[in-house]
Image (spheres, helix red, strand yellow):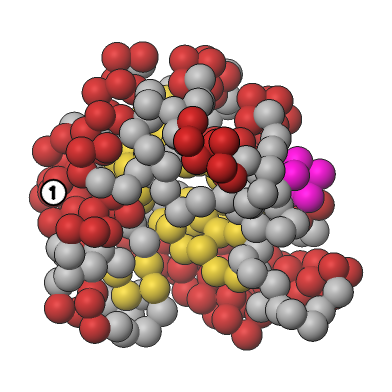
């Protein structure tokens, strides 16, 4: 049986205008054992100036390793979302994320199908996604990295839709990064869905949704960037934890919230349940 560990997606410092290293140190100060860095392709001003937490995959992957070792935390995975339906963007991006993850010690790279091209059919989109996942899985298998497919966009908003994407390529390097908040906002029962993917689960985005957001958006959207503090929304965390403890592997709950205060509240709440 697996263990549930506490981690946090570095989106929680997005509005602090601070660097990746600052975000890692803050996560460690709160008490998190794991962090989930976000990576990007190329260069951009805010990250280079130290005002944004994302890490360029043109940097040395050991930048992540060194920051985590200094703070005493580990990497649960990389937030490497790219539109799988657009191979001109996602194919080389996801392959580079796999290489980067292998070198910095991240066991999982998380992604979803992303916004689709305006002109393609559903059948064409699945061919395009298969191409990208086939290419990326070949690199991931050789490096012991797993690709975590997340419910977040037009096709993965239902269990059947996520299953169809997962089945495009038969590979041990492709699993599920379940998102509690996205599945709920998409109009699904998150616990029924989690039970369905439990045998394929490799990572979990611990995202709670306020009653107000639920009333305004449930069934109308496919997901949301971040949620509220865990324990202040609609998700039953005791039930979610109990389910994930039945996994064959350890599962990191990577909290997705929008502020440092919410990160602290989420840690305090989930730590008591664990």
Residue 191, percent from left and from top: 64, 25
Q: Nearer the viewer, residue 15 or 86?
A: 15
Residue 175 visible? The answer is no
Residue 166 painted magenta: no
Please name the residue shown 19% across and 51% down the image: 24
Residue 262, percent from left and from top: 27, 37
Residue 188 horizontal side relative to residue 56, left or right = right
Query: In which image quadrant can residue 124 be found?
Result: bottom right
Please name the residue shown 30% across and 21% down the image: 269
Residue 51 visible? The answer is yes
Please name the residue shown 57% across and 19% down the image: 243
Looking at the rendering, the stretch of residues picked out in magenta corresponds to 158-162
Q: Nearer the viewer, residue 257 or 215?
A: 215
Please name the residue shown 51% across and 76% down the image: 93
Residue 192, percent from left and from top: 70, 25
Total residue callouts = 1
Query: In which image quadrant can residue 66 be found?
Result: bottom left
Q: Nearer the viewer, residue 70 or 122?
A: 122
Residue where numbered disc 1 is placed: 25
Above or below, 209 against 168 in this view is above
Q: Residues within 10 Å of mark 1 (few under 14, many from 20)?
A: some
Give the dominant element type of the magenta stretch: helix, strand or loop: helix
Residue 142, percent from left and from top: 56, 61
Above or below, 162 against 155 in this view is above
Residue 57 horizontal side relative to residue 22, left or right = right
């Amino acid at each position: 049986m697996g263990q549930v560990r506490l981690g946090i997606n570095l989106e929680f410092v997005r509005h602090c205008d601070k660097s990746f290293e600052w975000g890692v140190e803050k996560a460690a100060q709160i008490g998190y054992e794991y962090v989930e860095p976000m990576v990007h392709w190329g260069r951009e001003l805010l990250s280079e100036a130290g005002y944004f937490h994302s890490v360029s995959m043109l940097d040395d992957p050991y930048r992540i390793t060194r920051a985590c070792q200094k703070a005493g935390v580990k990497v649960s995975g990389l937030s490497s979302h790219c539109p799988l339906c657009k191979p001109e963007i996602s194919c080389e991006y996801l392959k580079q994320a796999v290489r980067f993850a292998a070198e910095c010690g991240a066991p999982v790279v998380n992604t979803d199908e992303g916004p689709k091209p305006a002109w393609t059919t559903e059948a064409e989109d699945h061919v395009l996604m298969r191409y990208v996942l086939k290419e990326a899985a070949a690199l991931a298998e050789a490096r012991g990295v797993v690709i975590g497919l997340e419910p977040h966009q037009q096709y993965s908003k239902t269990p059947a839709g996520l299953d169809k994407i997962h089945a495009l390529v038969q590979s041990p390097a492709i699993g599920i990064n379940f998102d509690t908040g996205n599945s709920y906002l998409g109009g699904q029962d998150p616990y029924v869905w989690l039970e369905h993917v439990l045998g394929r689960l490799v990572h979990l985005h611990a995202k709670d949704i306020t009653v107000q957001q639920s009333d305004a958006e449930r069934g109308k959207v496919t997901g949301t960037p971040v949620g509220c503090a865990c324990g202040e929304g609609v998700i039953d965390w005791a039930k979610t934890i109990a389910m994930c403890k039945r996994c064959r592997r350890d599962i990191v709950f990577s909290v997705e919230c929008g502020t440092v205060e919410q990160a602290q509240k989420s840690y305090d709440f989930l730590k008591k349940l664990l």
